[in-house]
Image: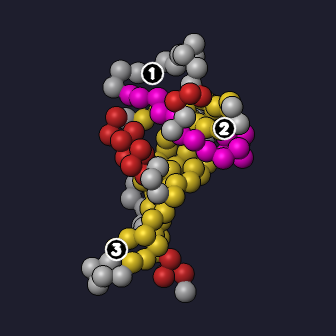
Amino acid sequence: MLPSLLPAKKTFDIPAGWRAYTLETDAVTAQNAAPGGRVDILMGFDAVLKTGGSNYVVATILQRVLVIDTVRAEGKNGLVLMLAPDDAQYLLLAENENIKVVFRRPDDAAAGPIQVSVLSNLF
């Protein structure tokens, strides 16, 4: 996380029960994001199989996350996201893995189960 990138003087209108979460991103993501936009958060990780092996999988862990600001300071980039407390905890856990922010169309309101992608299914 980028706690130093969220200046103390900056305030957000955070509704009761919600959190503003700063997620470090690459420069391209921060440059292309805009306050009011929506993103999904994907996580890639090695899943341990019941057979004892492992397989690389990608799962959409959060959908339609509201971007409330972008941050660029001290050579780092990030997004400030509006999250429910449980989602903030899940995102912090996911930051130990490979995560990626993907942009959504503003009018794309669909959210629901998305099948996990498994690397071995590509071949």
Q: Nearer the viewer, residue 55 or 36?
A: 55
Q: Residue at x 32, y 78 (%)?
A: 49
Percent x, y of residue 46: 43, 70
Q: Residue furthest left?
A: 50
Judge whether residue 91 can be spotted in this image.
Answer: yes
Query: Label 2 neighbourhood size at 10 Å, few (<14), some (14-19), many (20+)?
Result: some
Residue 8 higher or lower than 38, as above or below: above
The residue to which callout 1 is attached is 14
Q: Residue at x 71, y 44 (%)?
A: 27
* Colour style of the rendered protein structure: secondary structure
Q: Which residues are magenta?
A: 18-32
Q: Amino acid at mark 2?
A: Lys
The kind of secondary structure element at disc 3 is strand
Q: Residue at x 42, y 35 (%)?
A: 83
Separation of marks 2 and 3 at Cα, in angstroms: 33 Å
Separation of marks 1 and 2 at Cα, in angstroms: 24 Å
Q: Amino acid at mark 3?
A: Val
Q: Amino acid at mark 1?
A: Ile
The kind of secondary structure element at disc 2 is strand
Label drawn at residue 48: 3
The residue to which callout 2 is attached is 76
Residue 46 higher or lower than 42, as above or below: below
Q: Nearer the viewer, mark 1 or mark 2?
A: 2
Q: Earlier in the sequence, mark 1 or mark 2?
A: 1
Q: Earlier in the sequence, mark 3 or mark 1?
A: 1
Percent x, y of residue 95: 47, 49
Query: Label 1 neighbourhood size at 10 Å, few (<14), some (14-19), many (20+)?
Result: few
Q: Earlier in the sequence, mark 2 or mark 3?
A: 3
Q: Nearer the viewer, residue 41 or 91?
A: 91
Query: Label 3 neighbourhood size at 10 Å, few (<14), some (14-19), many (20+)?
Result: few
